[in-house]
Image (spheres, rainbow, N blue to C red):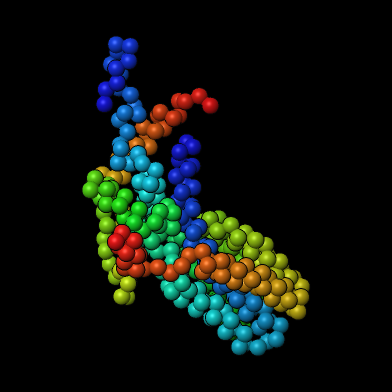
Amino acid sequence: MSEMIDLRDVERRAWTLYFQDGLWDIFFGLLFLGGGLRALTDNLWFYLLVFAGILIFILGKRWITLPRLGQIHFSAGRKARTAVVRVVALGAMIVTAVIFILIVTGSDLSGLPLNWLFVIMVPGVFLLMAYMMDFTRLYGYAILVTVFTVLGEFVGDPAAAWAQIIAGMVPLAVGIFLLIRFLRTYPAVDESTLAEGADNGRS
Amino acid sequence: MAVHNSGQEQIHPLADLDRTIHSPARLMIMTNLYVVESAEFIALMNLTGLSWGNLSTHLSKLEEAGYVEMEKGFRGKKPYTMVRLTGDGRAAFKTYKDQMQGVLGELPD
């Protein structure tokens, strides 16, 4: 049995290597920060921070992480866990979008416990992501999300907006720190350069 | 390999260990490949801590034994090599794991 645990540990170590780049943290940081600043100032331009977060994440994985860590195709079990996270996150986004559309179009939703729905759903998605993705830091971010979601639903702005801004600064700072450390730890390499280096070393 | 002991012929489980796998570097490579579908050469370097030359040498031995297969490709203009265990490699690692578990599992603390 201990052998099995070791192999799981080896797989988990390979998997979590990809969380060392800090890009998820930067993404969540900008997501929270953008939402919080928009809520505080009512300025829609702050949503650009959210788009910046998405852009940094996608481009960073392609141009920073991949050349440094290389690619690993994980087992079917790991892919299934990731698929569950995607489906649940997509489901939560659809539910939020539907409620938003219903509110904007003037539907009467006063009879529905929407406060509780969001207080349970939003941190729930983060907790599920943390568990299914073996992403330990996300448990901490789930606590931050819970705080500003509860404030948002039961207290309102500006307290909730400030809580969300502060909650955004935490993962953003962690992400920047991790990214700098990642860049120092893992230099960008390509196989042709390595092969040339090895050949020169032999001659 | 048969080991004679007190006149009785015994088959010692350690003697049957696969020597191709039973080297620290190749064991690290096989273990890391066993838990994933495939991994890029650079990823294996990061996971095992082996240098390019070392990893290349050990992978060649594993490839000769039919335990791994390598596929070269290009990402943009940059070359990369994906490495995966073959069916034989997976079976050989499983056998090795069971043998080691059998031997070490019965040792007293």
Q: Is residue A194 left or right of residue A49?
A: left
List x then y, in percent, for residue A170: 66, 69
Foreground of the two, A113 or B72: B72
Point out the image quarter for the N terminus of chain B. Answer: top left
- At horizontal 27% and vertical 57% (from top left) the residue drawn is B70
- At horizontal 62% and vertical 59% (from top left) the residue drawn is A139
Figure check: B1 above or below A84:
above
Q: Is residue A34 left or right of residue A160?
A: left
Foreground of the two, B28 or A40: B28
Q: Is residue B47 left or right of residue B63?
A: right
Residue at the outermost top position:
B7
List x then y, in percent, for residue A117: 64, 66
Q: Is residue A22 visible?
A: no
- At horizontal 38% and vertical 37% (from top left) the residue drawn is B97
- At horizontal 62% and vertical 85% (from top left) the residue drawn is A46
List x then y, in percent, for residue B33: 36, 51
The quadrant in which residue A164 appears is bottom right
Figure check: B16 above or below B20:
above
Residue at the outermost front position:
A203
Figure check: B15 above or below A147:
above
